[in-house]
Structure formats: C-alpha cells, structure tokens
Image (spheres, rainbow, N blue to C red):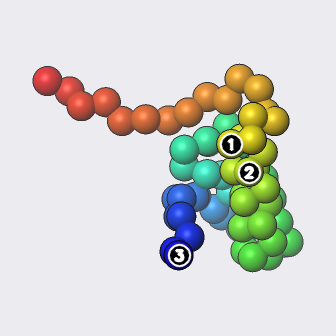
Amino acid sequence: MSKAKISFTYWQDGDFFLGYLEEYPDYVTQGESLEDLKEHLNDIYKEINEGNIPNVRKSAELELH
C-alpha cells in the first residue's frame, strides 16, 4: 500500500529549516534538519485531520468561467 503525499514549501533560515503544508499555509513550523521539519509537518497534518486544531483555513483552486 502506497503512502499519501502532500506538497510542502520549505526554506532554510540560519541553522533551521522552516516550512508549511501547501494546503495549510497558516501553520508554519521548523526543524533542525529537513527530516526533522518533515516530521513536524506530519504532526501538523495529523493534528488537523484528527480535528485537534480548530478553525482551520484551507486552500483550494477555483475554475474561472
């Protein structure tokens, strides 16, 4: 069974890697390495989808006519 994938944006600022999930840009987190950042992003995704974070804003695409 393959794992689901989600896009994220990241950058390095000094010694830290910062980033957010593309679908949830309001939730920026950081890690000491890229792998550490990915773990934190996984935690955020899990917390959002379990309903533990209230009032989550989401991104979506709109098809224009």
| Mark 3–mark 2 distance (CA, rounded to whole Å) | 19 Å
Q: Residues within 10 Å of mark 1 (few under 14, many from 20)?
A: few
Q: What amino acid does circle 2 point to?
A: Lys
Q: Which residue is mark 1?
A: 49
Q: What amino acid does circle 1 point to?
A: Asn
> Which of the two labelled residues, at mark 1 and mark 3, occupies the earlier sequence position?
3
Q: Which residue is mark 3?
A: 1
- Percent of width and height locating residue 21: 61, 51
With respect to residue 28, does 41 lie above or below? below
- Percent of width and height locating residue 54: 77, 26
* Numbered disc in front, either 3 or 2: 3
What residue is drawn where x is 31% and y is 30%? Answer: 62
Q: Is residue 65 left or right of residue 26?
A: left
Residue in front for this viewpoint, 12 or 54: 54
Q: Which residue is mark 2?
A: 46
Asked where in the image residue 39 lies, by quadrant, the reply is bottom right
What residue is drawn where x is 61% and y is 42%? Answer: 25
Asked where in the image residue 27 lies, by quadrant, the reply is top right
Element under disc 3: loop
- Percent of width and height locating residue 18: 73, 59
